[in-house]
């Protein structure tokens, strides 16, 4: 499936600021069954956007606007091919845990086994694991499928009930949250049992046949676990899905702290109110357009075109 993606983020300040410095992780990855055919990032006010690849293979764009402004608009447009994934077996078979333990002993995946900023064991997490009877069992893949199903049954998807910096205990206490919370809980529990796990930010395409709980018009998050023989496998506890070609991967890291879509600082005096509005559109591209590939553009220095609409404020990033 080929997808066209438009991701617009608008920052508005009560008073003008004198400079903005920002880095952006919005370019879909090219690895495995996914290929980013085209990507363009534009800003308003205009800026020369530079790019680099971080140690996890994520493409990071960064820019500086050293001029007074009261609004910053960042628009990312992408064209992505996602092939159908290889069929996933129901179980790994004998020796799955032994292979995971052997890999952990080498230190190869230590960063995806150790606690991180938003994926840390807590008392409430231990209580939840006991409640659902979570243990290694006979097969790692069977255990992870069961964990995902239990989370789907026991947690309510409730937008705007948590923040991007909320600890997992908030979602655990209320038994509700958003995709970011569920990914962090899944990752922490998987790591505690010796399964390397990481956070994935991206998008989920929804059509008329899908019954996803996650919000349309926003970014999405899920988890990936590294399993013997099959590699990284995506688990989406928000929707009780194994990640497939509808899941468009943008960035991977230990947790959300490694891969926020936007991160930056500004200089100048600003009132306390600060508006952030995010609008995301993901749609399939018809086969008739398959031969018309836009050349890959790593950066663009022109102003963004159409400004974000006022009603886009309801579509909040990750929320």
Image (tube, rainbow, N blue to C red):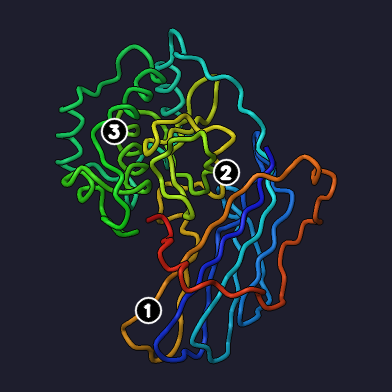
- When asked about the image quadrant of residue 308, the answer is bottom right
Reading the image, the residue beneath label 1 is: 274
Q: Is residue 245 left or right of residue 234?
A: right
Residue shown at the point (20%, 22%) measured from the top left: 133
Left or right, 195 with reference to 81: left
Query: The C terminus appears in which quarter of the rendering?
Result: bottom left
Residue 117 drawn at (x, y percent)? 33, 53
**Residue 105 vs residue 178, the one in the foreground:** 178
Distance from disc 3 to disc 2, alpha carbons, whole Å, reads 22 Å
Where does the image place residue 283, in percent across and percent down from the top left? 62, 48
Of the image marks 1 and 3, the number of the one nearer the N terminus: 3
The mark found on residue 151 in the picture is 3
> x and y percent of residue 315 in the render?
43, 61
Would you say the residues marked 1 and 3 are in contact, meaning their CB atoms lie under 8 Å apart?
Answer: no
Residue 248 got which mark?
A: 2
* 273 or 249, nearer to the observer: 273
The residue located at (41%, 61%) in the rendering is 316
Q: Position of residue 296 (x, y in %)?
A: 77, 56
């Amino acid at each position: 499936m080929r997808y066209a993606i438009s991701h617009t983020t608008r920052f508005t300040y009560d008073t003008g600021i004198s400079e903005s410095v920002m880095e952006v992780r919005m370019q879909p990855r090219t690895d495995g069954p996914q290929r980013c055919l085209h990507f363009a990032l534009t800003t308003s006010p205009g800026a020369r956007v530079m790019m680099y690849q971080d140690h996890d293979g994520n493409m990071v764009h960064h820019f500086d606007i050293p001029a007074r402004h009261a609004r910053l608009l960042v628009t990312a447009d992408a064209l992505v091919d996602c092939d159908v994934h290889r069929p996933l077996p129901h179980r790994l078979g004998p020796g799955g845990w032994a292979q995971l333990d052997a890999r952990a002993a080498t230190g190869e995946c230590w960063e995806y086994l150790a606690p991180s900023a938003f994926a840390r064991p807590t008392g409430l997490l231990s209580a939840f694991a006991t409640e659902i009877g979570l243990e290694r069992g006979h097969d790692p893949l069977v255990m992870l499928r069961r964990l995902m199903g239990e989370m789907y049954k026991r947690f309510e998807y409730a937008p705007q009930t948590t923040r991007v910096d909320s600890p997992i205990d908030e979602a655990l206490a209320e038994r509700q949250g958003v995709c970011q919370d569920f990914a962090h809980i899944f990752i922490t529990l998987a790591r505690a049992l010796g399964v390397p796990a990481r956070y994935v930010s991206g998008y989920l395409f929804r059509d008329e046949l899908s019954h996803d709980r996650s919000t349309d018009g926003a970014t999405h998050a899920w988890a990936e676990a590294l399993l013997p023989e099959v590699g990284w496998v995506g688990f989406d506890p928000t929707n009780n899905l194994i990640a497939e070609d509808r899941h468009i991967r943008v960035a991977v890291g230990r947790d959300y702290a490694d891969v926020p879509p936007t991160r930056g600082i500004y200089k100048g005096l600003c009132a306390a109110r600060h508006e952030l509005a995010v609008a995301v559109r993901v749609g399939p591209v018809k086969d008739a357009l398959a031969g018309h590939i836009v050349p890959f553009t790593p950066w663009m220095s022109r102003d963004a075109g159409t400004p974000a609409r006022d009603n886009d404020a309801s579509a909040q990033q990750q929320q």
